[in-house]
Image (tube, helix red, strand yellow):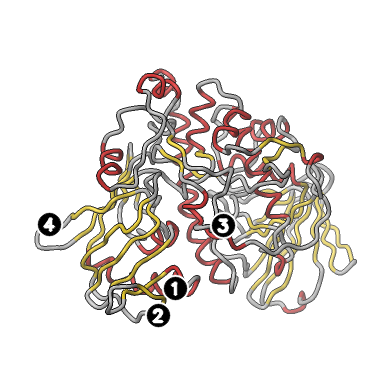
């Protein structure tokens, strides 16, 4: 086991890069959610996405329409769009075609209203790709397969890439998981990404923009890292395979970076009324440790047991060596108090039933609050069996507020300016959310300055497949179907041809 871990150093580095990309994408997620008035956040789509439009049966060749965001995933609206190609390409505006030579450039400006109401489609030569010069991904201009569509909007230009589902996945897999990972882990990632994309194809989330999904962490990251031979292999060797429930419906196969040694249930993560059968909570103990210790499950709902688990786990889990397996962050009382009111207001605006103010009688009710005041105490009100916090109480000088759901807890206590320390390093970057909601709060006051320390583990919402866990399992010889069956209990692998329309 230890030898295998040493071999995973390269994978750990790759995951660190991937996670950093996700952190940067959080900025885009916040902005895009503000721009899409009334749209629910990523963390809540599982219980909110009930409407659907009539779609044709999804096949391997079904096209997806991907809304491309600006540099840094800052916005869906572009001030300008510049496109070129290594080979000749064409731009068609309302049926009128214009030829461009290799390395030529087609340029569009948002301020130019002549494009209003026009259908603008850019096509490369056969076998070539289109390069977007007005966008950067990790310091380079990204290349795209098939067509790009430019649409004028009063807020800016919309840029959409239309391409077949399977080819879209070529550039999702490397953007979500380092292709230095074991092939079986990459194949598991490909199936998850395909299943999630198929569910997005059936949703109404991006219909206002004539798209199916975007290219950021708000959906799943696309083409932040270019496709390569290994990402294409992972997609091709799982062609058309998705995860489906017992009724034969494709399930959104959620995944996240790293567990804290436990995966959370879908119900706890998304606050659904009923359990999600294929997303149960599960202790991530390795088979070897389970056989040696006899431990099959643990209940981490009590503070003492959770803290003991975070401080020292006496057995190996599939994520034990991950960089985000354990982390901590300290924030001053002054810094938290300065921004908590605006964050509470954002959460309240999204769903008033999830931000509750204490009444004079001691109960809680939903009502707008002007100010919490100086934050005097943070109390974990509800912790699930997995250790995930789903309710926290903030005791302020002016009000006492209960914040519900792991997403809101992570948002209200987020860390835009503080340094987060994790295994093997530290990070100071804009994060709209805490790494996870699996943490406890300690007093970090010193030199007469009050402060709180969050000590926890894992990165992401915690439901579905842990990407690092999948890498470890692949390193232990597990096949991709075994990995998926482990994380999505009760779900089955199906071909798209077997899924009803």
Can you identify the residue that label 2 sits on? 368
- Disc 3 packing (10 Å; few <14; some 14–19; many ≥20): many
The numbered dot on residue 47 is none
The numbered dot on residue 348 is 1
Can you identify the residue that label 4 sits on? 446
Quadrant showing the N terminus? top left
Q: Measure how far apart labels 3 and 2 are at the Cα level.
A: 27 Å
> Which one is earlier in the sequence, the residue at label 1 or at label 3?
3
Residue beneath the point at 54% across and 43% down: 464
Q: Measure how far apart labels 4 and 3 are at the Cα level.
A: 38 Å
- Where residue 106 appears, as percent x and y from the top left, is 74, 62
Q: Is residue 204 above or below residue 486?
A: below
Pick whichever, 101 or 28, lies toward us. 28
> Which one is earlier in the sequence, the residue at label 1 or at label 4?
1
Can you identify the residue that label 3 sits on? 218
Q: Measure how far apart labels 1 and 3 are at the Cα level.
A: 20 Å
Q: Is residue 237 above or below residue 375?
A: above
Assign a secondary structure to mark 1.
Answer: helix
Residue found at the very far front of the displayed protein:
361
């Amino acid at each position: 086991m230890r030898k295998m871990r040493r071999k995973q150093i390269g994978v750990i580095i790759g995951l660190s890069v991937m996670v950093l990309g996700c952190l940067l994408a959080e900025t885009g997620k916040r902005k895009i959610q503000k721009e899409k008035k009334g749209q629910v956040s990523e963390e809540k789509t599982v219980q909110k996405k009930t409407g659907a439009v009539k779609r044709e049966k999804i096949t391997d060749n079904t096209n997806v329409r991907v809304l491309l965001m600006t540099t840094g995933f800052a916005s869906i609206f572009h001030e300008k769009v510049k496109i070129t190609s290594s080979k000749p390409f064409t731009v068609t505006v309302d049926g009128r075609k214009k030829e461009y030579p290799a390395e030529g450039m087609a340029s569009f400006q948002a301020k130019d209203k002549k494009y209003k109401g026009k259908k603008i489609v850019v096509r490369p030569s056969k076998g070539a790709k289109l390069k977007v010069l007005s966008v950067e991904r990790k310091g380079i201009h990204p290349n795209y397969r098939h067509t790009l569509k430019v649409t004028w909007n009063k807020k800016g230009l919309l840029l959409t890439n239309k391409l077949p589902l399977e080819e879209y996945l070529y550039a999702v897999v490397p953007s979500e998981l380092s292709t230095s990972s074991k092939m079986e882990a990459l194949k598991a990632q490909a199936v998850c990404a395909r299943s999630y994309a198929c569910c997005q194809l059936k949703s109404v989330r991006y219909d206002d923009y004539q798209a199916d999904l975007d290219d950021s962490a708000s959906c799943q990251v696309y083409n932040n890292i270019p496709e390569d031979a290994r990402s294409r292999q992972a997609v091709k060797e799982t062609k058309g395979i998705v995860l489906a429930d017992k009724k034969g419906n494709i399930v959104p196969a959620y995944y996240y970076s790293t567990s804290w040694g436990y995966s959370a249930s879908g119900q706890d993560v998304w606050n659904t009324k009923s359990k999600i059968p294929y997303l149960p909570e599960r202790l991530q103990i390795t088979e070897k440790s389970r056989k040696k210790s006899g431990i099959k499950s643990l209940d981490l709902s009590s503070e003492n047991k959770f803290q003991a688990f975070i401080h020292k786990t006496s057995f190996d889990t599939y994520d034990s060596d991950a960089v985000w397996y354990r982390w901590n962050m300290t924030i001053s009382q002054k810094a938290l108090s300065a921004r908590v009111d605006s964050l509470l207001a954002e959460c309240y605006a999204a769903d008033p039933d999830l931000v509750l103010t204490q009444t004079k009688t001691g109960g809680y009710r939903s009502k707008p609050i002007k100010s919490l005041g100086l934050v005097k105490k943070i109390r974990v009100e509800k912790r699930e069996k997995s250790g995930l916090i789903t309710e926290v109480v903030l005791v302020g000088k002016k009000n006492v507020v209960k914040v519900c759901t792991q997403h809101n807890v992570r948002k209200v206590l987020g860390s835009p300016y503080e340094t987060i320390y994790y295994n093997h390093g530290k990070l100071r970057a804009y994060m709209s959310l805490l790494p996870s909601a699996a943490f406890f709060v300690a007093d970090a006051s010193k030199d007469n300055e009050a402060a709180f320390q969050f000590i926890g583990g894992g990165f992401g919402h915690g439901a579905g497949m842990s990407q690092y866990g999948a890498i470890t399992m692949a390193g232990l010889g597990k096949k991709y179907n075994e990995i998926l069956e482990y994380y999505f209990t009760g779900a089955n692998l199906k071909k798209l041809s077997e899924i009803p329309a």
